[in-house]
Image (spheres, rainbow, N blue to C red):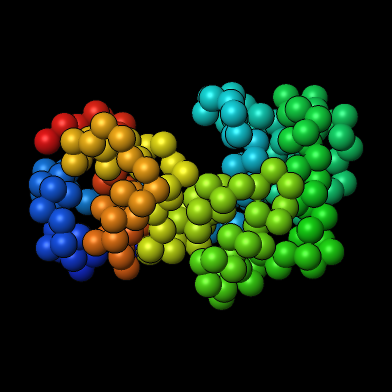
Amino acid sequence: MLFPYGQTEMAYLCQNDSHLAKVIHTVGKIERQVRPDVFTALISSIISQQISGKAAETVRLRVLSLVGGKLSPQKLAAIPDEALRSCGLSRQKTGYLHAAAQAALEGIIDFSALQKLPDEEVIARLTALPGVGRWTAEMLLIFSLCRMDVISYHDFGIRKGIQLLYGLEKLDKAAFQKYTAVYHPYATVASFYLWHIANNNLVL
């Protein structure tokens, strides 16, 4: 499944930011995969913390093998710590995964109901879990809940993209908010292009 956006959002960003417009016209539509199951996406995010993408995928596949190929809070909670750690997870991450599973099972977080909540409420609920910071919650808003207006100050790639786009040596939070104000209510789509700029070191 791809993040749903199109010409309306792209045209809005082009109209509001001539710098970004050059990138959008050059690159065209950027397609980004999403994972609608928030719980599964959260577990993958925790696994991926502070390790390479290749290593994270290896660990994720090992965990999936333990649960028979389909992840659920019930199956994850039933896996002993030792078995999870044998997949390559640290003791700390094992605790984070079990805490997320227990939160789902005990109704502390109703993952299926997050879609109905405002962005900041989703962030508040997710960051109450151990091992889940604001950046992780913001990425889940984008890549699981498909929220249209998310741009993360805590994301290095986003900040780098803005600096390259506008030729800035430094970018504090106040400046970040000023430059990104024109992207609302389609800031998520702007994020896709800022990541592209950062990943390709584009200088306009």
Vertical relation: 189 (above or below) 91: below
Near-viewer residue (182 or 64): 182
Which one is nearer the viewer's eye here, 184 or 30? 184
| Left or right: residue 23 compared with residue 156 | left
Query: Is 107 on the left or on the right of 112, as rendered?
Result: right
Where is the N terminus found, in terms of image quarters?
A: bottom left
Q: Position of residue 129 (x, y in %)?
A: 72, 52
Q: Position of residue 175 (x, y in %)?
A: 31, 49
Q: Position of residue 44 (x, y in %)?
A: 61, 42
How many callouts does the rendering have?
A: 0
Please tell me which residue is depicted at 39% across the width and 48% down the height of the picture.
173
Quarter of the view holding residue 127 = bottom right
Q: Is residue 94 left or right of residue 61?
A: right
Between residues 70 and 31, which one lies in front from this camera angle?
31
The image quadrant where one finds the C terminus is top left
Where does residue 155 sit, x and y in percent of width and height? Answer: 44, 42
Q: Is residue 90 in view? A: yes
Q: Relative to 79, is 16 above or below?
A: below
Residue 1 visible in the displayed image = no
